[in-house]
Amino acid sequence: MKRLIVTLVLIAIAQVMPGAGAKQKERTWRRGIVQDTSTQRTYVGSRTTRDYYGSETSEARYVKHYMVVIEGSDRIYVTWQTPRWRWSRVFVPAVNTEIEYSISEGRFYLKPIGGQKEFRAYVEKVIVKKPPTPPAERS
C-alpha cells in the first residue's frame, strides 16, 4: 500500500514539474563548413594533498578548451567549448566537414548533420563576410 501511494505521489510530482519529460526545443538549423579546430590548455591552479605521514604532493590543474571555426553563408563564427565534467563530451568535427549550427536565445549549438545530440558552444568572435566585388572591366 505504501509503495502504491509513493508511486502515485511521484507520478503526480513529475506531471506538475516544469520541464519534466519535455521535448527538445525546435531550433532553426543552418549548415556551415568547419574551417579550423584547435585545443588549448589553461592553467587554473594547483592542488596540494597530504598523506598520513605528513608529506605533501602538489599537482598542477589545467582546463582544456576546444575551438571550432565555422563558416556560414554570411558569417564566420569562432566558437569554443569547455567540458563541464571529466566525463562530458565535446563536439570536435574534422576540418572541411559540413555541420549544422543554431543560434537561439544568445546561445550557440552545434551538431553533426542528421545527428540528435546538440553540443553547446560559446561564441568568441563573429566575422561578417563581405560580398565579393566584381572585377573592374578593362577598356
Image: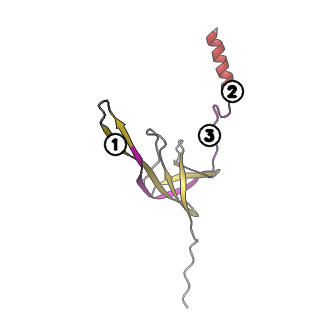
> For the point 56% across and 52% down, which residue is it?
101
Locate the C terminus and report the quarter of the image it occupies. bottom right
Secondary element type, mark 3 = loop
Q: Which is more N-terminal, label 3 or label 1?
A: 3
Query: At which x and y percent is residue 63?
Result: 43, 48
Residue hosting label 1: 58
Picture layout, residue 34 above or below residue 116: below
Residues drawn in magenta: 17-46
Residue hosting label 2: 15
Q: Which is more N-terminal, label 3 or label 2?
A: 2
On screen, residue 103 versus residue 111, left or right, reads right
Query: At which x and y percent is residue 37?
Result: 43, 56
Q: Which amino acid does label 1 sit on?
A: Ser
Q: Do the residues labelled 1 and 3 touch (CB within 8 Å)?
A: no
Whether 90 is among the magenta residues is no
Q: State the CA–CA distance, disc 1 to disc 2.
A: 49 Å
Secondary element type, mark 2 = helix
Residue hosting label 3: 24
Q: What residue type is labelled 3?
A: Gln
